[in-house]
Image (cartoon, rainbow, N blue to C red):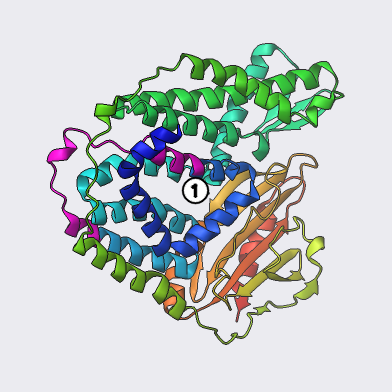
Amino acid sequence: MLRKTLNNLPLSKPYLVVTAIALGIFYPTWIRLAQAWLEFEQVLAHGLATAFIFLGLLLIHPPKVSATSKTLKPHRLMGATLLIATTLAWALLELVRIDTLAYLMLPIGVFAAGWAMLGLAQSLSFIPYILLLSLSLPIWADMVPALVELASIVVGNWVGWFGMTALIEGNSITLPYGRLLIADGCSGIRYFAISILLAMLTSILNDYRWRGWLTTLLAAMTLGLVANWVRISILVVVAYETNMQSDLLTDHETMGWIVYAVFVLPALYFSPVRQRKPSQNGRKPSSSCSKTGIAAVIISIVLGPIALTIAHSPSTPAPSWAVKLPEAKPANPSDMPIPLTLPNTLTQQVWHSEGLWVSLAQSQKLSADQKLVPYLRPPFDQSIWQLQETYRPGLVRVRNILSRRQVIVDQWFQVGAFQAQSYREAKLLQVPAMLKGQQRFALTTLQAACHQSTCNQALRQLEQKIKQLKIY
């Protein structure tokens, strides 16, 4: 292995240099990503291992330029332009701390740096490795709700086929002796991500073309999903047969990996293996320094990390927002019909007026490390409070699946002078707000409890109070 690595080092070196250049240009986001890897959270537990696999592949199995790509012109000027444009977009996203989009710019930056320094043919051969490195980005959390919903549908149908007595409501399965929740931890995101990682690793080592890549990825994703569905179904059967008394219901981590291994190990054993012949390693990428690429790197450093350092300067705090509502009295946040779960960075105030509850949670961006729009989890437990009806964006009716209580909830976000009805919209509005020097954020939530029979009165009351509500 060591001899093979030393023999491949001349082929690997240009790509390692390009990776180092990309790390230097986008280093603030890379440092934050490395910190996320070291936390080993459920959705990113594979991140650090993926980064090491990326480096290992470059050393023992460097990119091979295909015969069709060798005829392509380098077009380094286009690569330099892409690198500068990518750096500008990344710097803007990093300024307002839209982390998800900033993370997504990292693989684009690696590709653009490769194009500017090595030319188009070498950068195209680098794409499979960049895609593998992209698996280490914290983008998996956005897939969890969809995977939970899909698992709930599939497992719910399987429970019906087994003939068990169960009440299935969304991701809740109520059995005669208790209730099981298909929560975020049951999404199977770890099995899903690791399956894709193994599929990409197999595709790179076998030098697959696009058809082989697609087939391998689809098979791996299906395998990861089915393994998780089987795992959840086993837990439901165990809970049903043991009247919710089995220890497996509270400690099923090991069982989950055993089930996954039953699926993935045979697949790995029977997967094809193609060894690259020494003559197929491809020609050595040009190691000469491209003046265009060097100039693009220097400009990117100036427009990226240096410009960000200058832009992040201390700011003077602005006055906090306040609520004006006739006959409203201060109240305790825990007395709201649905107490909100908010980050510590937000300062919450609550008022109560004739059956209507108003919550104003706000913060200000005063430092470079602070976000204008902080990371917000769902404000209440959506496994308990389930959506029943949407009247308009932000205005919904939810029901407690345990007590059957219903509450009308209206919520919106204030980002500087801009107002948004969704969290994603609020994140995007950070850009114009920061460019205008506006650094205040607020989350406004209105709640009105319904009567047992209908929510019409609570809805009318809430809409009437909104007309009287002022935030100044």
Is residue 362 part of the magenta span, yes or no? no
Q: On the image, numbered disc 1 is attached to which residue? A: 137
Between 433 and 274, the residue placed more toward the observer is: 274
Q: Eyeballing the image, is 314 above or below 69?
A: below
Q: Image quarter for residue 247? A: top right
Neighbor class of circle 1 (other Cα within 10 Å; few <14, some 14-19, many 20+) is many
Residue 22, given in percent of the width and then of the height, sits at 38, 58
Between 254 and 294, the residue placed more toward the observer is: 294
Residue in the picture at 38% in, 39% down: 6
Residue 243 vs residue 368: left or right?
Answer: right
Count the marks: how many?
A: 1
Residue in the picture at 39% in, 64% down: 25
Q: Image quarter for residue 277? A: top left
Residue 426, given in percent of the width and then of the height, sits at 50, 63
Residue 90 vs residue 122: left or right?
Answer: right
Looking at the image, can residue 334 be seen?
yes
Residue 419, given in percent of the width and then of the height, sits at 50, 69
Between 307 and 17, the residue placed more toward the observer is: 17
The main secondary structure of the magenta stretch is helix
For mark 1, give the secondary structure: loop
Q: Amino acid at mark 1?
A: Leu
Q: Eyeballing the image, is 121 above or below 172?
A: below
Q: The magenta stretch spans which residues?
A: 52-81
Residue in the picture at 41% in, 63% down: 24
Looking at the image, can residue 230 be seen?
no
Please, which residue is most extreme toward the front here?
A: 3
Which quadrant: the C terminus?
Answer: bottom right
